[in-house]
Image (cartoon, grey):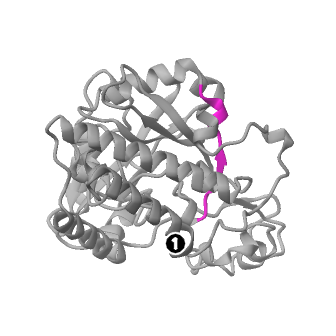
């Protein structure tokens, strides 16, 4: 079976694909889109005699990275020389460390404002903010749950952002990149007359999902951007927060695969997950150069190219079935090698804690 077919990707080129602003299922309720995915997961659990087997896909990561894992602990695993590709970061505990302490921690790892603040436990870009100066950090810490850990990470200035999915069966000598998602921030251009609210509602795409943008702009909706002024609507590269995703899986090259094989091998026991990067240019990325890693995600990550508006529902579900099938097969192989999967009770505890924390995090940028 060809890889494209297994992923649910047809052979059509982007030039042949009609441009859509939204797919009809792009913002369905989670329960509706994921219902067949859950059924497929349960069927895999019966087949492989373990409903939590994906938690064994990456044995060195808490629950395999399915949920409740620490972002800092995953990045701490990365060994040299791949470690040099990480955007520098530090972590502090809200309530135990104030802004002065946060700035000292930043200085210790050689970073300064602007930085990105993000929860250590979480997903979907929840609670991620751009921190430009001391006042921003003071406000962020005041809103963050006390006693919980957060990361302060250098802002990588590269314009491009991508999520690159890597899969390797334990008995395979090399893995493969199964998905590339290019992430674009929606931008409005001022006309000197319209308010931000009016610009959002008039935009062909943003105007169809204003609930993603207007709450974040609540304190600015009456601003009138100057003629030609560009206003970025969202900072975090996350689909459910309003970023626009483009399927870039056709951009995989041998050089890029070789580079990400080396990165994956630098993480003990890493077989399955998405590595998020910011990059200089597509040409440099194709050479496996000119990028920095901003996050590493395990078994709970998604091949996010499915949220390209041109992706069909059949292709999206096909990609989900392919990747979760791979996670179960990897988990089964690792279990046979002596790496147990998490039990249902401990996984539920991790999930409940993550859900509780995400509900308490500050609004993202």
Q: Quadrant of residue 108?
A: top left
Would residue 214 be seen by someone viewing this image from the given angle?
yes
Tell me if 128 is positioned left or right of 281 in this view: left
Tell me, yes or no, whether the highlighted magenta stretch contains residue 244.
yes
Residue 194 found in image quarter: bottom right
Q: Seen in the image, is 288 located left or right of residue 98?
A: right
Q: Residue at x 35, y 49 (%)?
A: 299
Q: Magenta part of the protein: which range?
A: 242-252
On the rendered structure, is 140 left or right of 216? left
Q: Is residue 63 above or below residue 273?
A: below
**Horizontal and vertical percent for residue 172?**
36, 24
| Residue under the point 65% across and 24% down | 283
Image location (x, y in percent) of residue 252: 60, 28
Tell which of 117 and 242 is nearer to you.
242
- Asked if residue 324 lies in the magenta stretch, the reply is no
Residue farthest front in this picture: 47
């Amino acid at each position: 079976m060809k890889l494209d077919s297994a992923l649910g990707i047809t052979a059509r080129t982007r030039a042949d694909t009609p441009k859509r602003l939204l797919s009809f299922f792009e913002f369905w309720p989670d329960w509706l889109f994921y219902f067949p995915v859950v059924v497929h997961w349960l069927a895999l659990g019966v087949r492989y005699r373990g409903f939590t087997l994906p938690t064994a896909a990456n044995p060195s990561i808490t629950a395999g990275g399915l949920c409740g894992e620490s972002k800092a602990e995953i990045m701490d695993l990365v060994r040299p020389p791949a470690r040099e590709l990480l955007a520098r970061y530090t972590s502090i505990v809200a309530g135990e460390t104030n802004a002065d302490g946060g700035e000292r921690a930043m200085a210790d790892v050689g970073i300064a404002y602007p930085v990105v603040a993000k929860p250590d436990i979480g997903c979907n870009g929840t609670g991620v903010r751009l921190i430009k100066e001391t006042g921003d950090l003071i406000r962020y810490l005041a809103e963050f749950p006390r006693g919980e850990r957060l990361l302060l990470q250098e802002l990588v200035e590269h314009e491009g952002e991508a999520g690159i999915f890597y899969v390797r069966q334990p008995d395979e000598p090399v893995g493969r990149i199964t998905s590339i998602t290019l992430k674009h921030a929606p931008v409005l251009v001022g006309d000197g007359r319209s308010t931000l609210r009016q610009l959002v509602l008039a935009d062909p795409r943003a105007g169809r999902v204003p609930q993603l943008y207007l709450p974040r702009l609540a304190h600015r909706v009456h601003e009138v951007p100057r003629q030609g002024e560009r206003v970025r609507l969202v900072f975090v590269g996350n689909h459910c927060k309003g970023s626009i995703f483009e399927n870039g899986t056709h951009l995989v090259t041998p050089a890029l695969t070789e580079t990400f094989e080396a990165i994956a091998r630098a993480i003990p026991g890493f077989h399955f997950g998405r590595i998020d990067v910011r990059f200089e240019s597509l040409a440099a990325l194709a050479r496996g150069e000119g990028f920095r890693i901003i996050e590493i995600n395990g078994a709970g990550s998604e091949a996010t190219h499915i949220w390209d508006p041109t992706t069909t529902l059949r292709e999206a579900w096909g990609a989900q079935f392919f990747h979760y099938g791979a996670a179960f097969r990897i988990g089964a192989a690792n279990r046979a090698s002596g790496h147990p999967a998490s039990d249902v009770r401990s996984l539920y505890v991790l999930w409940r804690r993550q859900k509780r924390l995400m509900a308490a995090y500050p609004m993202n940028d």
